[in-house]
Amino acid sequence: MIQHFIKIAFRNFRKYKAFSILNVSALAIGMAGAMLLLIWIQHQLSIDQFHEKKENLYKVFANQNIDGQIQTSASIPIASLTLLQSGIPEIRNITGIRAGNKLLQFSETKLNVVGNVVDPAFLDMFSFPLISGNKETALQDSKSIVISEKLAKSLFRTEDPMNKVIRADGKDNFIVKGVCKDPPDNTQFGFDYLVSDESGGSQNAQPGILVELQRDANIAAVNDKMNAIIARDKTTTEKTTLFLYPLQKLWLQSHFENGKPAGGGIDLIRFLGLVAGIILLIGCINFMNLSTARSIKRAKEVGVRKILGGSRQMLIGQFIGESVFMSFVAGILALGIVAFALPSFNTVTGGNLVIRYADPYFWIGLISFILLTGIMAGSYPAFFLSSFKPVKALQGLLEKRHVYLTPKKILFVFQFVVAIVLINITILVQKQVRHLKDRETGFVREHLVFHSMTNDLRKSYAVLKNELLHSGSVVSVSASDIPITRSGKQTKIGDIDFEVRSCQENFISTNGLQLIAGRDIDVVKFPGDTNACIINESAVIAMNLENPVGTTLKDNTHYWRVIGIVKNFINHSPLQAVTPVMIRGSNDNSFINLRVSETKSMVDNIVIVSAIFKKYNSNYITELQFADDDYALKVRGLKVTALLTNIFASIAIFISCLGLLGLVMYTAESRSKEMSIRKVFGAGVVSLNFVLAKDFIRLVIIAIIVASPVSWLLMDSFLRPLYYRTSLSPFILFQTAGIALLITAITIGSHPSGRLGLIP
């Protein structure tokens, strides 16, 4: 029986080639779009789920009550975290995790790599297996290092790296005590090296503390014991409570509001899951529409089968089987599309996704996905076709052209509603991106270059600076703790949260800031400027200062004299409001900032500047960084969102157009006699086109009417949380309506049968 159904399905595929190709193409594109998103979603859901002890691993968070608002932080504000392990028997292991980077050198090979500063228990807690070495002892010594397999090959080539000495940052020696398998892509703790925290890690405030609990530990009891310990700690200045949060939720659900979990990356997962479902649903709806549209062609087949004793259940099984067959063909095409598109998708999202052909779970998931799609797409046509009465089916009395509301029309309208909503959102997101690009940054990022302050450069900074300024390629030099394009540390002055930066001299001129009052910091010329600071307009407003220059501000431990006021500059995301900023004088800085000449080409400037840096930075790799590139990272997320919205909106529109084209083909074919009679009676091509197109245009107008208020609500909810946002204009809705009608007209006119001059 199944073999018979497959044979019939294959014959129908060959007999109705045009319809079959349209059906399979639309379904394949919808499946490919959904598969791309589902592969990305599956990767996100798998992050750090491979650790054997994941159910017993927790991260320590701190809630601080500040002005009645509870702020949650992963930076633990106590000085004796070893008490957590020694004082709480339920804690089996504890480790700090602090990301960093080092210049590692073996022989003549130098590499800048990223890694983690951890505690010795790290390798026992997490499933990063060692190829060489003992995980129990590999990180016991502060001068031991564990490296990844990839780094071992890069540094040592074919040599055995165990017990070899690696020089780090030109000053520290580490002994290789372990080689680790390369961490997988689905971890947030990726590294090329691991070193043990020289200060004991667990004894200092850490940006990340993770603990392993005993299997039978009570979380609430552990939280109570931690807070009993912190209550005895004298370094805590604010009311602080600690709590444990599961590692399994850390990646996607680590956003907190007023001390309570409030989503996070899981919100994006749910949204993209919804988009994947909608894209697939549009493909299935397209399949339903085209299948039911040509139902008249199969009516006699249904009638004959019923007269010969075929039951409705058998017919439903046959038609769903045909749908599953088409779905398998579409699934194979979709897999090819995904394989072709995945490298570009990775480029857009910054990911490294792959199709795991060798994984049996992948094939189980793919086959299940295809079967589900086939059943979903074929369900309505199967029930519709199997409901035909045998006599009417044989007589061809099935069409109800004058019925105003039919399932086919509802599905068609729904398709275009989704497409129109996506077009509206796409236009708005693009408008928001342009709005951000046009926002005044408050500093001049063009021709602004920076380099990390290595130990070699720190020793030769004065000579380096002088040579750069006399090279003709650099007009200003400044040393600071971070580049202006990055966010600084946070502190509290009174009740006001401040972002804190530090600099040595020429910070304003080098970065192109606008000085409103006072002067720039110059620690070289005025050594007392190590107690001075510059603040921005937001700080003046927040602290209600009438004459800010000369005012003294106090943080937890120090007094700072305000010597200058600068105009606001973007210090966080361009989507956010500018917060109060304090720029302090300091001789201890981590970056060198350069403003290069605008009269020379950028290429010439970089060649000259790089040569000078290499001269004084021989023990390190010279890597110039650019403010333009750094700033672009701030809006990259929104640009990626805009691009993905464009892509998937285009997919939805394309599938809808394929469905419309199929319906045009069917309508032109089924009404060919009517069109011929109209021509005989003198109807012109324009009037015939209008007769054919008016029903579809009417449905598209209904879709526009339904989609417009939905689009407005979604666009408003998208913009509302953004501090710096574009305006929401009704013009977007009119623009989208015009696009939808134009696409409809082009699609109808693109088929020869639609250009009714060709109809006999």
Image: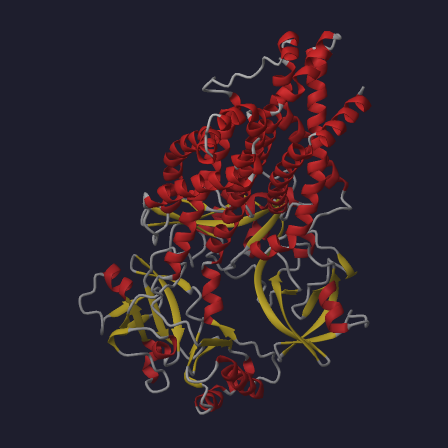
Count of numbered circles on the image: 0
* Quarter of image, res 30: top right
Residue 244 visible in the picture: no
Measuring from the top left, give residue 81's x and y in whole percent. 53, 56
Q: Is residue 448 above or below residue 430?
A: below
* Quarter of image, res 545: bottom left
Q: Is residue 471 above or below residue 753?
A: below
Q: Quadrant of the C terminus?
A: top right
In this view, the residue in front, 34 or 630, is 34
Residue 61 visible in the picture: yes
In this view, the residue in front, 364 or 31, is 31
In this view, the residue in front, 212 or 620, is 620
Residue at the (42%, 48%) spot, across then down? 427
Q: Is residue 444 above or below residue 321?
A: below
Measuring from the top left, give residue 312's x and y in whole percent. 68, 12
In this view, the residue in front, 607 or 748, is 748
Residue at the (75%, 7%) spot, across then down? 309
Measuring from the top left, give residue 267's x and y in whole percent. 50, 42
Residue projecting furthest to the left: 546
Q: Is residue 56 above or below residue 587?
A: above
Measuring from the top left, give residue 54's x and y in whole percent. 65, 45
Residue at the (37%, 41%) spot, across then down? 733
Q: Quadrant of the N terminus?
A: top right
Residue at the (37%, 46%) spot, across then down? 719
